[in-house]
Amino acid sequence: MPTILLTGATGYIASHTWLSLLSSGFEVLGVDDFSNSSPLVLDRLRELCGTRPVFERLDVTDRVAMHALFARHRIDAVVHFAAFKAVGDSTARPLAYYRNNVGGLLSVCDVMQANGCKRIVFSSSATVYGDPPSLPIREDSPLAATNPYGQTKLMGETMLRDLGAADAAWQTGCLRYFNPVGAHESGRIGEDPRGTPNNLMPFVAQVAVGRRPHLSVFGRDWPTIDGTGVRDYIHVCDLADGHVAALRRLLDTAGCFTVNLGTGQGNSVLEVVNAYARASGREVPVQFAPRRPGDIAACYADPLLAQQLLCWRAKHDLARMCADSWRWQSLNPEGFQ
Ligand code: UDP
């Protein structure tokens, strides 16, 4: 079976993808520098898959270490997750984002090229659509990043598009994630944000488990069903399966692609809060607060292209996303410890 290199392998989406790849029969080699994840993820993966994960601690911007890695392992394709991902942080520390996200991808591609490995799946984001002119969002919607994080994702896509155009041997898949939430059904791995969560569901989870008194709802005057922001929440295990489908396509079919990975369903902040309260049996007190700078009213995918190209579609609904998030949160109230 092909061997897949996962960069940023102990992160939230990557660790779930690791499990999906193993259960689909792929060999996986993971690397991470633990700058935003815990080594304990490796113990949990071992417990869940029954074998010791193949892992090396490494920073992808370290080209010497990356070359040595490729010399030691046969690698058929790369899934490049390693990146910083906090929008607000990116506006405060733009250089760190360009260095790590753009520089990291550049270093990975250089080393891949030198070693004759030309298949890569790239973690992009729906943030590349900015404030979309129409919904649902198709892949040919205009692109407009509104912050440095989004810029790094756009630049990554551009780099891969140019690479594919220059050399038909390169096969690239850009996956535009909508809003990943939930956790593996075992409750053993899940999202473990450092500090105050920026994203809605991990924040709601910490309110439900009693770590925080209430959720601040950013805006109640958006032009949406109940005045709160609408997003396309997708179960992280569906997202993980989307990576397996993308790799299968790259291994089978020449060419490059860019697809949305979303459900096509939009839910408001209050719908998420209510679904979470039902799933957890806990109260989730809310306070209304002003709009968050840079936010948009609504964002949800047209998921048709991924169905056509990858034969993939999301299966889990919001109730299941909340139930799995709650299992992880209640079993691990302080995250990985
Ligand atoms: N949101 C909120 N309170 C929070 C975090 C998020 O009301 O503490 C809202 C936010 O304004 C948006 C939605 O929840 O409408 C999803 O936000 P998130 O940051 O998870 O995703 P993104 O906005 O990046 O798609």
Image (cartoon, grey):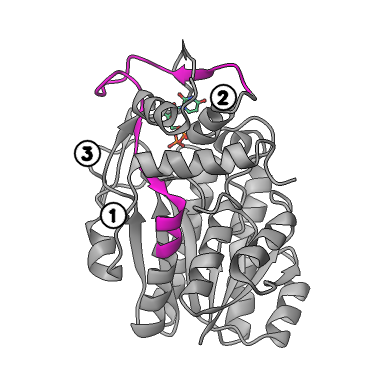
Mark 2 and mark 3 lie on one chain; the one further toward the N terminus is: 3
Q: Position of residue 221 (x, y in %)?
A: 33, 14
Indicate yes or no whether the magenta region holds residue 221: yes
Indicate yes or no whether the magenta region holds residue 125: no
Mark 2: give few (<14), some (14-19) or many (20+) Cα within 10 Å: some
Q: Report how far apart the C-alphas of labels 2 and 3 lie in the structure.
A: 33 Å
Vertical placement of residue 158 versus 217, above or below: below
Q: Which residue is mark 2?
A: 207
On the question of residue 161 being in view, the answer is no
Q: Which residue is mark 3?
A: 134
Answer with left or right where residue 159 lies relative to residue 303. Answer: right
Q: Report how far apart the C-alphas of labels 1 and 2 lie in the structure.
A: 35 Å
Vertical placement of residue 280 versus 219, above or below: below
Q: Residue at x 25, y 37 (%)?
A: 133
Answer with left or right where residue 248 lies relative to residue 193. Answer: left
Mark 1 and mark 3 lie on one chain; the one further toward the N terminus is: 3
Which mark's residue is nearer the viewer, 2 or 3? 2
Question: Which mark, residue 139?
Answer: 1
Task: Label 2: state its secondary structure.
Answer: helix
Whether the residues at callouts 1 and 3 have beta carbons within 8 Å, the answer is no
Point out the stretch of residues depicted in magenta: 212-241
